[in-house]
Image (cartoon, coloured by chain):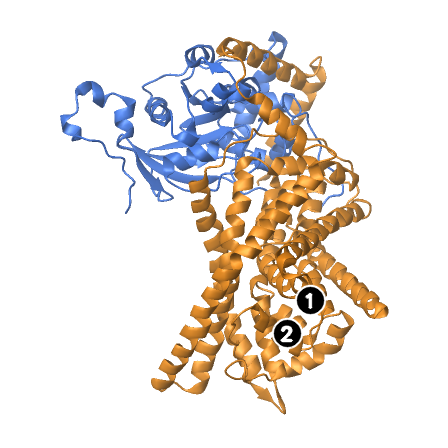
Amino acid sequence: MSAQTLALQQDLLETAQRWRERIPGDLHEHVVEAIYADAMRIAARAVSRPGAAAQPTFDRWLDRVVTSRVWGFPIMAALFTLMFWITISGANVPSQALAGLLVDQIHPWLRETTTGLGWPWWLRGVLVDGMYLSTAWVVSVMLPPMAIFFPLFTLLEDFGYLPRVAFNLDALFKKAGAHGKQAMSLMMGFGCNAAGVVSTRIIDSPRERLLAIITNNFSLCNGRWPTQILIATIFIGALAPAYLSGLAAAGTVVAVASLGVAMAFAMSWLLSRTVLRGELSTFSLELPPYRPPRIGQTLYISLLDRTIFVLWRAVVFALPAGAVIWLTGNVRVGDASLAEHAVRFLDPLGFWLGLNGVILLAYLIAIPANEIVIPTVLMLTVTVTGMTDLGAGAGVMFELDDENAVASLLRAGGWTTLTAVNLMLFSLLHNPCSTTIYTIYRETGSTRWTALAILLPVVVGVVVCVGVAAVWRALQ
Amino acid sequence: MNTNTLTRAGSPAAAHEACARCDVFRAARLRKLGVKVDRWDYVVALAGNPNTGKSTVFNALTGLRQHTGNWPGKTVTRAEGGFEYDGRRYKLVDLPGTYSLLSTSVDEQIARDFILFGQPDVTVIVADATRLERNLNLVLQVLEITPRVVLCVNLVDEARRHGLEVDARQLARDLGVPVVLTAARRGQGLAELLGAIADVATGRVACRPHRLATDPPALQPALKELTAKVETAFPGLPNARWVALRLLAGDESIIEAVRRGELGQLREPAPVAPTDQPAARQPAIVAP
């Protein structure tokens, strides 16, 4: 900007200031009043009410129920539990069918074919046992639950339920010193934290928007749902009688997700009393009318926009990760593979956290995308326990017959119920994925706030995991 | 390329001349261009209060499938798409919902800046028929800025369910711009909407927008001087008079834009400033 332009702008502002002082009354209010008056007059001439209201009483009644002090929260819990129960029980069969096809049938066939073609063992290892198998795993573990969960969530969104959730949570957010619209970004975070961070733009105060950005990672994103659902099914669900196991697993997932929401409140409260002190701003949230969801279009959009998009992202990250996993499992230094060295090194820290070295290494490899944590964990377990009979050699993700096979493998790898519980907790409470980190940086424009957004959940996760492990072991 | 051309029985050549002038017939020649808008004849902005169905209208006209959701604040960025109608190409810009042009959240600034400075050929305001009075607050503000407006009163099906009838002719007379009633979710009224957009874009219909009686005579010298200074400091800026009025009213976001020399620039929203203080707030125009 040249000095001349600057002077012009300065002059403009000063002139405006001078005139402002000379004009009697509040011009802003005057304008607003004029707009209101005209809008009222014009609307009154154009809108008529020939018939009696046909159905508005139903909307009103429904609103009174779902936002009531007594029923609001139970209905929320019941709806989300129902959603996860449908997802968990519905995803089981297609997941196994996909694994049977991609892992049990196509993988051996690929190995035979490439061996027949005379590929060297390392090329076959990287491509077939590493990249193909990790991708096949991601698809069979993630596709069925997402294909059920996302349409259900979208139907709820289309119907108009989400603003009612925001309405219910508003009082809690107010107590936490945060903006009520943070509930909306929290809900978006259930889909994807990066999207959740972008959606905080609806919050107009910078202070409250920062609170929403920093705490968004506490809402469980879809990359972490499969981890929760799988671990809850095989460890927690198995503890309950068979006819209740689906419900127990769903309840566990809801509990973990609720813990995340509680953490978002707690951290907002903490931040708004320390580094992000400031006033609460008021806002109006419109409760839109309930609309019958358009089933066909919802299915189409949620499958295409959400399911395929997320799956594609997972596959893109799973391909190189598969190669890395295979290499760490097969490149030997001294007496053991790279993976074994790393796992041994991380084991003491893992024990302290109630986890193990395998899980920590998996989280390091999976920083780009949470989606591949479970495949990485399983593969590393095979490598370290040396259960070559289950798979086809070190660094090969084993064949998955059913979830019992996963459970017995993990138990052989030294897993207990504590490991499972803490994996679920750590999956909820750890750093955001790289995409979200980048989005946070872009939205805040500050390395300081980005660093806080990364470190806060990690610190919370470590504290919670160490605490749970200590209490658990003390009780035993 | 899949053009999604709607087809009708009979060849266009055989159509009666009266048919050729009918909106419904011309809508049959709508080509949805999706995101492929490399060149266009007209730019159309879609504005309106939150959750009135802007994205639904956007999807219906462009053939895109932007995610729509039943909650206010779903769209936080500009989405762009295109369509071809009656031989002309249009670029359609879906703006975040806003209750007012006088408020300060990032998504609302995106909408305001585009209407103010993006100089769209037509601004379509999508209004909720069931809450027309509050929606008119925004309509009246937009009419202060640009005359080239089409009012799309959406959700008339819902209004009917609530026992409300909207008189489009009366509205059009009072506002001085074309008014179309639609139920975009069911595709009703879209043909008429396309016709109205084309009429305003090509200048077949001249708008005589309703103006607010906001300028007391005492204000005239102030407005005159400030408008001139705005034009000198920011040459080529449309709506210098509106900017002057906002400066007089002490609009912090406009004052800040002048100070930074960024007035009139369309950019991605600025990151939230790392500040411990909430931004200076202004009463937003939101009817109870």
Frontmost residue, B141 versus A96: A96
**Res B177 quadrant in image:** top left
Tell me the chain of label 1.
A
Q: Residues within 10 Å of mark 1 (few under 14, many from 20)?
A: many
Residue type pointed to by label 2: Leu
Return the residue at label 1: A420
The outermost residue toward the left is B14
Return the residue at label 2: A410
- Left or right: residue A240 compared with residue B149: right
Secondary structure, mark 2, is helix
**Residue at 63% in and 21% down:** B287
Q: Quadrant of the C terminus of chain B?
A: top right
Residue type pointed to by label 1: Ala
- Left or right: residue B195 compared with residue A284: left
Secondary structure, mark 1, is helix
Image location (x, y in percent) of residue B119: 45, 30
Image location (x, y in percent) of residue A291: 52, 31
Tell me the chain of label 2.
A
